[in-house]
Structure formats: C-alpha cells, structure tokens
Image (tube, grey):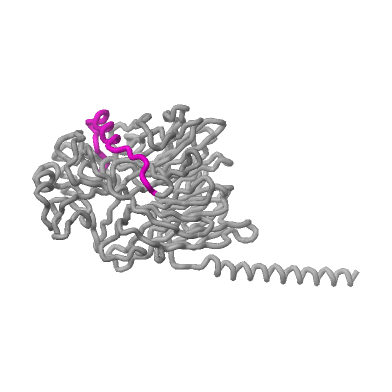
Amino acid sequence: MRSLLLVSVVIMLIVSACNYQARKVDVVQQLTNNPDIGGGQVVFYSTTGEFLDVANVGTLPDMVTFTPDGKTVISANEGEPVDDYSSDPKGSVSIINLQELERGLVQNVTTMTFDDVQIPTALRIKPGASPAKDIEPEYVAVNAAGTTAWVSLQENNGLAIIDIAAKKIISVTALGRKEFNHIDINTKDGATVATAPNNLYGLYQPDTIVCYQVDGKDYVVSANEGDDREYSGWEDYTKANKLKAPFSPQLTRDVLDVKGRKKLRVLRDLGMDESGVYTELYLAGTRSFSIWDAAGKQVYDSGSDFERYLAQHYGNQFNTRVDDTDDRNDIAELIADEIPYEAIGETVYFWDGVDARSAKKGCEPEALAVVGIGAKTFAYIGLEKQGGFFVYDITVPKDAHFVAYNNDIDYGKLPSSSGDLAPEGMVSFNQNGNHYLAIANELSSTVAIYSLGQDGKAVKLSSLALGMFASGAAEIVTYDAYGKMLFVTNSETNSVDLVDVADPAQPQKVSSIDVSAHGASLQSVAVNNGIVAIAVSRK
C-alpha cells in the first residue's frame, strides 16, 4: 500500500511539473507570438460574457471581423494622429489566428503596416507625410472563401487587398475621383439637384464595405460617406471662400460668385495647378454607393440617385440633420428664429433646415448590409445624416437598381422622440427561414429590426432603446445565430449589450459584457462560433 501511495505521489509530481512546463511554454509563446506593440487590443469573451483572452494589435483598432470559418480575426487599425500631429501612429491591419481554448485562444498575431507596400501616386496622402503613417484603415470585408480581405482606407480614398493565409498586404488601390453630373451644393435653393459645375469632383472615401460573390467572382460594395481631418495640427476641410489661393475664372463664376455655393466645403489639399490656382474642387464623399471588382475597379455607382429621390420625396426635409449646440448665443438665435429645440443636459438638439447638408457631405451614406434572398442579392445603405436607408437589387453588379427607401422619422417632432436616427451599423440574419435586418442607430441609441421580403423590401417590426439619446448607446451590431442574439456596442456604458431576438418583433436586452477592465473605449464587435471579439483602445 505504501509503495502504491509513493508511486501515486511521484506521478502527481510529474504531471504537475509537466503542467507547469506547459504553462511556462504558453506564457513564453504568448509573448513571442502576441507581443505588446503599444497599440490597441482585441479582447475575446464567450457569448455568455466570460473573458477568454486578449490580442495585441495596432493603434486604434476601428473594426474587427472573423473569417467565415471562425478561426481568424482581422482588425483594421486606424492609427489616428494626436490633435497637434506631434504623433501620428502607423495605420495597420492585424491578423489574429485562434486555436483551441484549452491551449490559449490567441495562437498568434501578425500586424502589418504599409512600410514596404507599393503605394500608388493617386492615393491621397497628407502633404509632407509618409504613407505608412498617413494611411488610416477603416473597415474590413472578407470573401466567402476566407482567403482575401479588403480594407477601406477612408481618408486616403483607397482599398488595401490582403492575402489572409500569407498574412500580406498584396496591393493598395486608389479609388479615383467621381465627376458629378448632378448635385445640390447650393444652400439657398431648397431641394434642387442641379447640373454640377465643371471641374467639381468627389472622393469616394468609403466607410463600410461588404464583399459578395456573383458567378464565382468577388465584388466589394461600398458606402461612400466621405471623411475629413479636423485637427489643430492639420485641417483639410474648409469653405471654398476661405481658401487663400486664387480660383480659376470658371470656378470663381460657378462657385465663389454664387451666394448659396461660396461656402461649399472642399478638401483644400487638392485641385491646385502648378501655378497655385484652384482649377478643380474636391468634395469629401460622393453621396452614393458603389460596387467594385476584386481588384478595386469600379463596376457600378449610384450617381445622383440618392439626392434625386430625396429631393423629390422629402423636399421639406432634404439634406437635413439633427444639429446640437451648447453655445448661449446659438441658443438665443434659435429662440429668436422660433426654431424648436430640446435641452439634454447643457446641450440643445434641433433639426437643421432644408439644404443644411448640401454644402457639406449631403445625406452621408455610411451603414451597409448585403443580403442574399432566394436568387437575388440586395444592398441596404443607411444614411447617417438624412436618416433611413435605401434598398438596391445588386444581383447583377453592373445593373444594380433601386428597390425602395425606408424612412419613418417624424421630422415634425423634437429629435429625441422622432424615431431611429443616424444608422451606424447593420447586420442581416436568418431565423426559421425568414430574413431580417437589424440597424444600430447611434444618435437615437436604438436598435431597429426589419423583416425582409423576397423582393428585398423591408417592413419594420420593432425598435429598442439601449440608452440615453445622443449617448452612442447603439453603434455597431452583429448577430449570433446559435443564441439568436444581437451584440451591440454601447459607448455610454463601455459595454456590449446582448439583445435577444428570438422574436424579432419583441427584442429584449438580456445582459451586457462590460469591457472596462480591458479597454478605455470600444470600437467594434464581431461574433463567431461562440466567441465574441471586441476592438478596444488602451486604458
């Protein structure tokens, strides 16, 4: 008996030593394959909220997504500068390989910068900056095979193409410019989509992008929101009449000398000829959505469709938005002009007038979802400022066409009671053979759910408030099919809210994942195979 006991003790000691050695190897391997590079992080939880692991990625991870098999996570790390531009971290893309949880979920992390990538001369780069620091990855789309990722470089007006298995940025494509045919850039003419002046262009600058496949070929759909940089150390977006360089006679006549156009917002680093004269003007965004082939060549653009439709059907609310101010003089002016407003804390919110966005970025297409229903494929494009979303049939990429526009905002009410405002994130899901669309609305802090018909048209089922108005309590949304649950980022509480949508007509918030222990703020969320990935900035 004593001999047996002695043998048992020896075996336990050996097993213990082996386990210790395994843990030691895991720690060393973690430091080697998942080094702390001083950037942001992607933290992993179970769908029940249990913390699992963390991956160290580049600075300011702005969007995170899984490959379809759930074995790889890709993070777009924006690397924005500090306000005075004394520091501008490199933009990057991180690839996170996962393994069995028992071995430590994060197997390795590879963060790719643009240092050794050939950059086309047409890619927009801040004057005097290095491309590696100036490039700002925004959003990631992955093909169905899980072999290729496309990353939107919003401020730079480009796409990066990633070979996922090789963990390599294989190319960067400049998306070029759009010459406007019809556009409303006049803040004094109401809902009038007129012939565009000559030499007026827009940069696509897509935010959300989604990949889909037609006849074995990959295509990328983009919501062309536009973006600008407004820092104390560099501001690239200004009113045309504030530009210090002279204009060509044609632009002087067609823009500067027109009362409602002279304050048109333009990108000041573009459009000058060699003599320092503005002969072209460039806008941020194109007020459209586009379809691109796998190499980044444009196949389709919706042109002026959005503005034409809104001008015709929403003439009294055309190019409006919810504005806010805490300035006493502004508030006194609202009172004098008898403009309705509401106070939330020290800030007042009110509807801007018609044409308020015409000199800026228009309706701002931002949110995007692509859904296959039967033999057809539909794109749903959310408008951040105007509100609502367009539906297009994109089954044939070159022949995409309008299906519907959904907008149930009551513009006659004060903003906080007017409906779902500022669609930021979208996700489609299928339950019991039925198709649905969930939309996270940043300003109203609501999640709206729609049923989708075979014709792609959407019917609203419900809207659930997840926080205070204007608190950012609903921004990015994703779906877990196993639990029939939405996961929604909530900036108000620095958490991810879990919303039960087993009955989409009666969604219920059931719990939250608090990320405060692992990050100062959260940017994005994705879920796959029971694993939740959340992009966070450092505490």
Q: Which residues are magenta?
A: 296-323
Q: Position of residue 410 (x, y in %)?
A: 30, 31
- Front residue (pair 190, 477): 190
Residue 518 in sight here: no
The quadrant where residue 58 appears: bottom left
Is the N terminus in the top left, top right, bottom left or bottom right quadrant?
bottom right
- Front residue (pair 315, 499): 315
Direction from residue 10 to residue 490 in the image, left or right:
left
Q: Is residue 302 magenta?
A: yes
When the figure is inspected, residue 520 is found, relative to residue 433, above or below; the finding is: below
Direction from residue 534 to residue 28 in the image, left or right:
right
Residue 310 in sight here: yes
Q: Position of residue 84 (x, y in %)?
A: 27, 65
Q: Is residue 153 magenta?
A: no
Q: Residue at point 20% right, 33% down?
A: 191
Q: Position of residue 103 (x, y in %)?
A: 64, 61
Q: Position of residue 326 (x, y in %)?
A: 23, 49
Direction from residue 257 to residue 449 in the image, left or right:
right
